[in-house]
Amino acid sequence: MEMTKDDHPHGRTRVSASHAINNFVDKRRNRSPLTTGPSNARTEEARTIDMAHANLSHRRTHNILLISRLLNQREGASPFTLVLDTLEQPAHPLLREYVRRSQLAKNHTIFLSFEKPHAPAGIDTWIPCWNKSPQQIAQAVSTACTQANKRCLILIDSLTRLGKASIQPKPDVDLTAFLMSLFQPPRASQASVSIVAVYHLDIPLHPSATPYSPTPLSLLEYLATTVITVHSLPTLLSDKQARERSLAAPSFGLAEGKQGVLVGLKPQGSIKPDELGIVLQLEHRRKSGRGVLEWYFLPEKTSARGPSSAFKESVSLLDDQPLFKKAECLEDQDLADVPFSLGLTDRQRLEREGVVLPYFDAQLAGGGGEGGRILYDMGAEDDFDEEEDEI
């Protein structure tokens, strides 16, 4: 059967019916099947797993490179880094890591001490600040940068004292002006300056004299390009174990509310000596305004490594830490001998959460006490049977 130009209502072309049928069959063969069988479900699940692994690999590579640039204090990585610590986990291990990497990079390290009575190891210039004014501190830093004539890393062991002085009724310290004075090296020196400052979260401060002025912590967080909060690994493990058992997270130290308790006793039984370290919660702000949030693990025995591994990156993602992957590994071992998959894909999990069970209406106010009445809404495709309704 053929349709000529005269027979066609629009009078366009000659079309063969058999040719049109063959084209339709070819398109149906090339099209993906409408039904999803077991093999297609397994393929979709494998594709989802591959995408998850690819995303984790990309995130690991990108964020490890980021933390390496920040700890090494490369040119323009982070001019002002704010480190937040507590009594449960001081920032001393992180400061030692900064000093170690500064020595490897052959930078000049300046330590502004408000708490330590002596200079830590590996410091090039140690400036005691408890008996100096902010102007004298800035002058001493300027002199040290001039003598060094190379890139300088300024470490401040505590900004809490300056923050407390800045909120007095007649403040003699301006945090913003003090930090800006440290960023301005002498004109004779072309060296760039990076600042890493520690702020103690456990030390309470009196309210500001003016109610509309920001707190010192809010001001420092606003000025910082990178904010690193240090956490204790045993504390996070205890929180993780309690969360897995649907229990309340335990409290340590000042959070316990017990008189005389400053630092809590943390469980150390499940942590091996080679797994000790601190957890870093990073918030980095790029020049474009985009922020990066990530959790890292810094091993404790970083400084004890040999010279061959001095330039090997020791920081890893917290998700790659063995203690945080232990539960997943055990679950995979238990299901290793099962010939089929017991897990759910992301799509199946979303569909399961979207199912509305029929007994939800009975749990509403006024829904109980009706003798287990079944609520059923008739759909458009349902047939009404009078005989079954009479039963």
Image: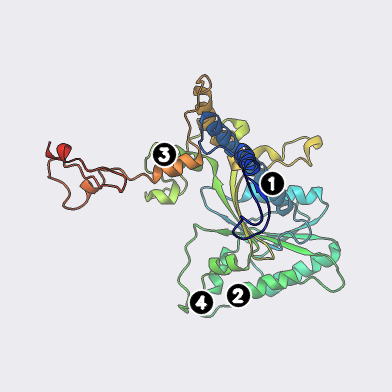
- Residue marked by disc 1: 64
* Foreground of the two, 104 or 13: 13
Q: Relative to residue 98, is residue 342 drawn left or right?
A: left
Q: Residue 118 has which mark?
A: none
Residue 292 is situated, as x and y percent measured from the top left of the image, at: 62, 56
Q: CA distance from mark 4 to mark 2?
A: 14 Å
Q: Nearer the viewer, mark 3 or mark 4?
A: 3
| Quadrant (top left/top right/bottom left/bottom right) for the C terminus | top left
Q: Secondary structure at mark 4?
A: loop
| Label drawn at residue 242 | 3
- On the rendered image, what quadrant is the N terminus found in? top right
Disc 1 marks a residue whose amino acid type is Ile
User: Of the numbered discs in the image, which one, if any, rests on residue 213?
Assistant: 4
N-term mark: 1 or 2: 1
Would you identify the image quadrant in which residue 181 lies?
A: bottom right
Which of disc 4 and disc 3 is earlier in sequence?
4
Residue furthest out toward the front: 6
Residue 52 location (% of width, % of height): 60, 41
Residue drawn at the location 33% of the way across and 45% of the way down: 356
**Neighbours of disc 1 within 10 Å: few (<14), some (14-19), many (20+):** some
Q: Which image quadrant is residue 358 in?
A: top left
The answer for how far apart the CA atoms under marks 1 and 4 are is 37 Å
User: According to the image, label 2 marks what residue?
Assistant: 173
Q: Closer to the camera, 316 or 117?
A: 316
Crowdedness of circle 3 by 10 Å Cα count: few (<14), some, many (20+)?
A: some
